């Protein structure tokens, strides 16, 4: 059996990919405010639309959420190496369930209140998962799939492991991974492939990505080596499929083609990340802690920025850049000076809380 010793070490590339994916999510959500249809999904809209920005966003949109699910499955695979089932459930409950529940009742209503203020709608309290739907899905996947994952862990020399190693040694084996995603798109038939939030399609595509993310790590270094070797070919094919969709379907196209393109993008991004990002840095140490609270609060910051910036008589692109800066900086400042430093807030945003005021007195 292939040794897994190398993946017992910290994988900084996985941490970087999570940070980058959340950063891209912020930019993507900001771009929605400049699309005429953004109002139909509850976003504050600029009076200066900028539909051209949706051309690159459409390349990003079909793989940004699947990537997060793949990375989450990988994270669970690493967590299981040092934790039993009970420890994993406790940790994931603290890290996911508590922030999820707190976010629904205390954070999400904030951006709804800003939206109501902007459009002169009488204020009302609205509790809704909104962008936190992702956390609810992850929690379900962990509970449902962890018995299978621990069974596979106890049978690391079994047939399934050998099958995965054999499959991932060949780049064509990646096509086998894509098949369930294609089937999902044809069976569920989502109205739009990119509609993930609180949909049946989003649930099942997330389930598949989470499962295969675990499998990629369970297979040892085989998958990692393959996507590193073939990353540029995978990227070229993914980009080629995007151009085909752009020029032949005006960025739409059948869902089964989008499903193939989505996975090719993910494999290429993973290969690039595995090649260049697996090294520690002070920035990563900080951002890997900050990114989760920032994800939770970013919509409130985005809506507040929209309320302040969209009335300005400046070009749409200037609004776009200002809104990126406002959202990013305000999220970082909120994390640094409030969430990170107030001990009783830390668990509500998925952070460990090792020190309390009484601990400092005892030192």
Image (cartoon, grey):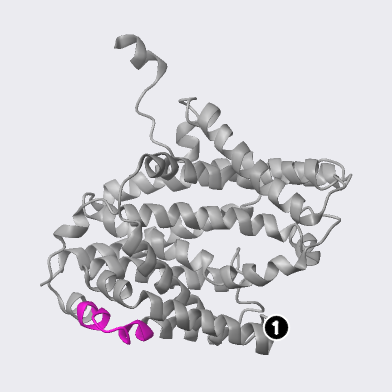
Q: Position of residue 45 (x, y in %)?
A: 80, 55
Seen as rendered, the residue at the extreme top is 361
Q: Is residue 63 left or right of residue 3?
A: right
Q: Quadrant of residue 208?
A: bottom left
Q: Quadrant of residue 114?
A: top right
Q: Position of residue 84 (x, y in %)?
A: 23, 51
Residue 45 appears in the figure: no
Pick whichever, 107 or 174, lies toward us: 174
Name the residue carrying label 1: 250
Residue 325 is a magenta residue: no
Q: Is residue 251 left or right of residue 270?
A: right
Mark 1 is surrounded, within 10 Å at the Cα level, by few (under 14), some (14 to 19) or many (20 or more) other residues, namely few
Q: Is residue 324 left or right of residue 123?
A: left
Q: Position of residue 250 (x, y in %)?
A: 70, 83
Residue at the image position 52 percent from the left and 79 percent from the top: 239
Magenta stretch in the rendered image: 164-176
Residue at the image position 30 percent from the left and 10 percent from the top: 362
In what quadrant of the picture does the C terminus appear?
top left
The vertical placement of 355 against 10, above or below, is above
The vertical placement of 163 against 211, above or below, is below
Residue at the image position 66 percent from the left and 82 percent from the top: 252
Residue at the image position 64 percent from the left and 54 percent from the top: 130
Q: How many numbered markers are drawn? A: 1
Seen as rendered, the residue at the extreme bottom is 248
Q: Position of residue 25 (x, y in %)?
A: 57, 57
Residue 170 is a magenta residue: yes
In what quadrant of the picture does the N terminus appear?
bottom left
Q: Secondary structure at mark 1?
A: loop
Q: Main secondary structure of the magenta part?
A: helix
């Amino acid at each position: 059996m292939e040794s897994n010793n190398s993946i017992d070490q910290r994988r900084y590339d996985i941490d970087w990919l999570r940070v980058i994916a959340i950063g891209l999510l912020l930019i993507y959500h900001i771009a929605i405010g400049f699309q005429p249809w953004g109002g139909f999904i509850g976003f504050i809209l600029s009076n200066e639309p900028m539909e051209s920005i949706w051309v690159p966003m459409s390349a990003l949109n079909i793989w940004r959420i699947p990537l997060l699910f793949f990375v989450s499955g990988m994270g669970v695979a690493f967590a299981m190496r040092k934790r039993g089932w009970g420890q994993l459930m406790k940790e994931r409950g603290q890290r996911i369930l508590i922030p999820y529940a707190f976010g629904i009742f205390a954070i999400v209503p904030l951006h709804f209140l800003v939206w109501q203020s902007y459009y002169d709608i009488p204020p009302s309290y609205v509790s809704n998962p909104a962008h936190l739907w992702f956390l609810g899905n992850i929690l379900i996947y962990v509970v449902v799939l962890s018995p299978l994952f621990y069974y596979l862990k106890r049978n690391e020399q079994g047939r399934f492991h050998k099958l995965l190693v054999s499959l991932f040694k060949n780049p064509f084996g990646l096509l086998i991974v894509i098949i369930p995603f294609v089937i999902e798109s044809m069976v569920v038939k989502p109205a739009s492939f990119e509609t993930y939030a609180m949909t049946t399609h989003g649930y099942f595509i997330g389930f598949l990505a989470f499962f295969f993310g675990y499998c990629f790590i369970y297979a040892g270094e085989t998958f990692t080596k393959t996507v590193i070797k073939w990353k540029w070919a995978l990227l070229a094919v993914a980009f080629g499929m995007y151009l085909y969709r752009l020029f032949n379907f005006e960025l739409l196209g059948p869902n089964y083609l989008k499903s193939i393109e989505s996975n090719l993008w993910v494999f290429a991004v993973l290969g690039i990340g595995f090649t260049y990002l697996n090294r520690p840095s002070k920035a990563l140490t900080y951002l890997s802690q900050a990114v989760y609270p920032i994800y939770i609060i970013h919509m409130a910051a985005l809506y507040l920025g929209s309320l302040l910036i969209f009335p300005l008589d400046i070009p749409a692109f200037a609004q776009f850049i200002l809104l990126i800066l406002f959202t990013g900086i305000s999220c970082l400042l909120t994390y640094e000076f409030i969430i990170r430093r107030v001990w009783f807030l830390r668990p509500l945003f998925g952070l460990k809380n090792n020190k309390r005021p009484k601990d400092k007195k005892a030192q």
